[in-house]
Amino acid sequence: MLITMSDKEIQRLAVLQDVRDHRITQVRAAEILNLSTRQITRLLQKLNQDGVSGLAHASRGQPGHHRHDDLLKSQCLSIISEHLLGFGPTLAHEKLSSMFALDIPVETVRRWMMANDLWIPRSKRLKRPYQPRYNRDCFGELIQIDGSYHDWFEGRATKWFISMMLPASCCICAFVKLKRPLTICFQPEPTLSNMANLWPFTATNIRYLESTRNPAKTARSRNLGGF
């Protein structure tokens, strides 16, 4: 029979066995365990009557008094799997309270969803594979283009699209060879305008491109700031 005991209960067992073997007195055992001699006597009676299991907490392994009913748990999980699939525990808790009148603590919902594979915590999710974009060998091989459609003239004209072109082969080379990126303002359509204004930017590095015979490649980027 496997008996689960805490460190405190294991210490009590060791001291009470010393008392039974007459190695220490009950008064000394009370001082070690910080208990009264009367409580030491009661613990010795439990040990002699029920054995080691008599020192374990009686409520260990028993269902909690404040636990939710199994019918409520199954109802909650069925609602989540049918209507709230893909929701996180916090949002599922809010929807259960507002739409289905089930007032269940969010941590309880979290435990139920994790136990039934309805939600995976972020720490246990598999990392998404990202293909790294390595630096280009030569300056000017790759050009990043980013833009923003905004009321740049503050109501004095229609909305314009501002575009910035920057060589992305190497950040160090980009700032050494080109002191500042080329910025162009034009009206939509941005895609056609980007293509039409690509050559003025590459013309700044035309000598280098002609010497290396590397065609300029263009990539849209969402990570360029500065606007």
Image (cartoon, rainbow, N blue to C red):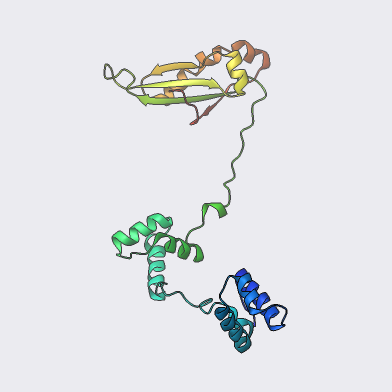
Q: Nearer the viewer, residue 8 or 36?
A: 36
Q: Nearer the viewer, residue 14 or 25?
A: 25
Q: Nearer the viewer, residue 95 or 209?
A: 95
Tell me where residue 4 appears, x and y as whole percent: 61, 75
Q: Is residue 41 above or below residue 141?
A: below
Q: Is residue 47 left or right of residue 78?
A: right
Q: Is residue 113 left or right of residue 158?
A: right
Is residue 125 visible in this depiction of the protein?
no
Image point (35%, 24%), residue name: 150
Q: Quadrant of residue 52?
A: bottom right
Is residue 180 visible in this depiction of the protein?
yes
Q: Nearer the viewer, residue 11 or 184?
A: 11
Q: Is residue 138 above or below residue 75?
A: above
Image point (65%, 83%), residue name: 1
Q: Is residue 102 above or below residue 209?
A: below
Image point (62%, 78%), residue name: 3
